[in-house]
Image: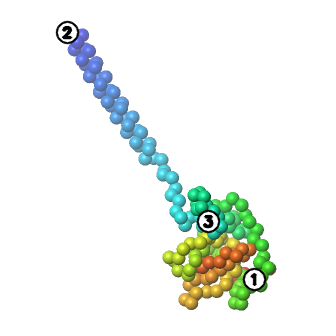
Amino acid sequence: MLSSFTKFILGFLLAIAVLIGGGVAVALYFMNRTGIPPAKPVFSNDAPSVKGQATKATETGAGKPTLTPGTNTKSSSLNSTSTPTPTESPKALPSRAYRGRVSWAQGLSLRSQPNQEAERIGGVGFNQKIIILEESEDKSWQKIRLEGSEQEGWVKAGNTEKVEKQ
């Protein structure tokens, strides 16, 4: 009789120990899972892209392309794998057009029309050389051409500055 009562007590204590140990293990697992920071989200406006790269990437189904900014990549917050050297356009500037550069540190979105809802056709990196062709009637948008290419589009005014030809 004593041995079966001892077996019962030992079995009961063992069952309690297993339940407590399992509960502690589950609690530690979930506490450790909540301590891991989530992956940084990637938004469509984080890395502006050049039109040719964006078209190729969407045709092949690849991920978001990154913009390769102009000459000053140290101050740029954009990811780039190479630094192209823009070439001077041999064409003369149109009347009232002037050379400039992007002064907004995050770069600019290039749009097809002078409004915020217009299609985004590319991007321009910080310090990238551009040609300002014209301004919208309300002076809040500027039509630009990327120096060294024929890509044109609209950017918000106030994010560029005029540079003297050197």
Q: CA distance from mark 2 to mark 1?
A: 104 Å
Q: CA distance from mark 2 to mark 3?
A: 84 Å
Image: 26 above or below 11: below
For marks 2 and 3 on the same chain, the one whose residue lies earlier in the sequence: 2
Q: Indicate the quadrant containing the C terminus: top left, top right, bottom left or bottom right.
A: bottom right
For marks 1 and 3 on the same chain, the one whose residue lies earlier in the sequence: 3
Question: What residue do we see at 25% from left, 19% from top?
Answer: 9
Q: Which residue is mark 1?
A: 164
As helix, strand or loop, the secondary structure at mark 2 comes to loop
Q: Report the front residue among 127 and 12.
A: 127
Residue extending farthest to the front is 59
Image coordinates of residue 159 in percent, x first then y, are: 61, 78
Q: Which residue is mark 3?
A: 55
Label 3 crowd bin: few (<14), some (14–19), many (20+), radius 10 Å: some
Q: Report the front residue among 97 and 72.
A: 97
Question: What residue do we see at 64% from left, 71% from top?
Answer: 124
